[in-house]
Amino acid sequence: MVLIEKTRKFVADVLADEPSSHEMSHIERVESTCMVIQSEEGGDIQVIRLAALLHDVGVVKEHREGGDHAVHSAEMAYDLLMKEGVESSVVDHVVSCIRTHRFSRGHKAASLEGQILQDADRIDALGAIGIFRAVMSMGALRSLKHSSGIEKSSSRNAYAADPLDGFAEYMEMKPFKIMGGLNTTTAKRIAADRLRIMHQYLDALEVETSNK
């Protein structure tokens, strides 16, 4: 538990000023969902928790320098865990989970632990929290472009002239495709409930924005 809490503090410090949807609350929701899935599917708890805590720690570097935050996160996780004296096989396992977690990269996880991290991270893009995160992230990306000129190539929908059009494009591009990419039965059950919430929201949004 000491290692877990030291890792949590490290990540919280790095992400203290993170303006988008990869802030510490996202990290801890992913960790919590990982534990729910693990309780039914199995897997190494230590590897899963370390990977969950560290999976987005490189997002600040991505904002600053570009590149892929999964790669940055994996490198930072390796450095931290080796420094803490964690067994190299455990470090390698955690790093592998982190490298393959991103939905947009289409990676296949090499282990059950990696599959659980993928599933938990993707589930956090669904339901009421998924809608909140999408809108929050779009606003942060638009603000970043306005203040620094930096655009994130993997999130082109965020820069649509009409934010509603950008939001609709995002929904079709990611949340509604997530179910087909989930690995575990537990995750699919959770996702089905959350997708119903998203469909209800979009139906209401269409009514409220209709010109009829």
Image (tube, grey):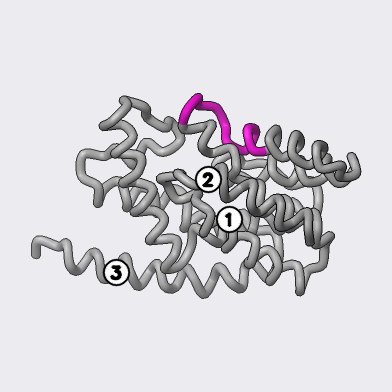
Where residue 58 appears, x then y in whole percent? 59, 37
Where's the N terminus, which quadrant?
bottom right
Element marked by disc 2? loop
Question: Considering depth in this image, is 173 or 87 the residue closer to the camera?
Answer: 87
Question: Which mark is on residue 15?
Answer: 2
> Magenta span covers which residues?
64-73
* Disc 1 from disc 2: Cα separation: 10 Å
Name the front one of labels 3 and 1: 1
Visible in this render: residue 39? yes
- Neighbor class of circle 2 (other Cα within 10 Å; few <14, some 14-19, many 20+) is some
Q: Is residue 112 visible?
A: no
Crowding around mark 3 (Cα neighbors within 10 Å: few <14, some 14 to 19, many 20+) is few
Quarter of the view holding residue 46:
bottom right
Q: Nearer the viewer, residue 172 or 54?
A: 54
**In the image, is 31 to the left or to the right of 64?**
right
Residue 91 percent across, percent down from the top left:
82, 42
| Nearest the eye: 157 or 60 | 60
Mark closer to the chain start, 3 or 1: 1
Left or right: 210, with 17 as reference point: left
- Tag 3 residue: 203
User: Mark 3 to mark 2: distance in Å?
Assistant: 34 Å
Q: Is residue 182 above or below residue 55?
A: below
